[in-house]
Image (spheres, helix red, strand yellow):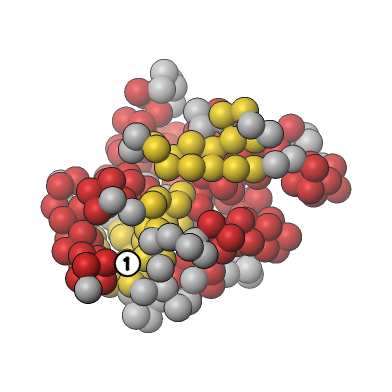
Amino acid sequence: MIVVIDGPAGSGKSSTARAVAERLGIQFLDSGALYRVATLLYLRAEKNKEMFFELLKENKISFHFNEKKFHVYLNDTNVSEEIRTMDVSQNVSVVATMPYVRSFVNALMHQAVEHEVFVADGRDLGTAVFPDAALKFFMVADLKTRAERRLSELQNKGSTATLEEVMDNIASRDEIDSTRSADPLKKADDAIEVDTSALNFEQQVLIICDQIKPLITS
């Protein structure tokens, strides 16, 4: 079974999905992290698409959720921190628009959710990847709130990025994600919208947990 949480960058979907998975004892799948690994390969290929697609074929991407963290590996090397740099953030939306990359990542996710209960976060999971998901959420928040959250994450990792830089990056990603031709960011018709602008973290986690519990205990 799969429960999906979609939404724009910085809306809190990843941290919320991780907390929900931990609290309910289910698996967590971070689709954005998989696109970030692909972006890492794109940068290593110096943005050469032909070389990049070859790297996707040649390299093994694996992942697991353990101790409240989603760990991502490239050829058995943990790249969970490397994929969170500003360089990757500035290029991930471009990579995510590539149909070949989307098909590649979607295949990885479908393989992962065949046998267990997962909660996954992303941008188009409820509309394109898992349209038959058992439950769908769409998380939103105003731009400044999202940028402040992302800046805090970056600063905790030693980044010197400014709030203006992060706001510009998120606004650019919003534009790319919502206007791309391949599976643009949008709310699924049957998704439950959760506006986190005025919610604290515990509140948003409880809202989603309360909706999922009946599905996994029945």
Question: Where residue 1 sits: x, y (%)?
Answer: 40, 68
Instruction: Tell me which residue sits at (22%, 61%) in the image.
Output: 208
Instruction: Tell me which residue sits at (31%, 60%) in the image.
Output: 139
- 131 relative to 161, above or below: below
Q: Determine if residue 193 is in view.
A: no
Question: Where residue 203 sits: x, y (%)?
Answer: 14, 52
- 97 relative to 28, above or below: below
- 104 relative to 182, above or below: above
Residue 70: image quadrant is: top left
Horizontal side of 93 relative to 9 (left or right) equals right
Instruction: Tell me which residue sits at (77%, 34%) in the image.
Output: 46
Horizontal side of 58 relative to 137 (left or right) equals right
**Which residue was labeled with disc 1?**
137
How crowded pointer 1 is (Cα within 10 Å; few <14, some 14-19, many 20+) is rated as many
182 vs 102, nearest the viewer: 102
Q: Amino acid at mark 1?
A: Phe
> Which element type, helix, strand or loop, lies under badge 1?
strand
Horizontal side of 51 relative to 61 (left or right) equals right
Instruction: Tell me which residue sits at (54%, 42%) in the image.
Output: 63
Question: Where residue 120 sits: x, y (%)?
Answer: 42, 57
87 vs 28, nearest the viewer: 28
Q: Determine if residue 104 is in view.
A: yes
- 161 relative to 39, above or below: above
Question: Where residue 105 sits: x, y (%)?
Answer: 62, 56
Residue 145: image quadrant is: top left
| Residue closest to the far right | 50
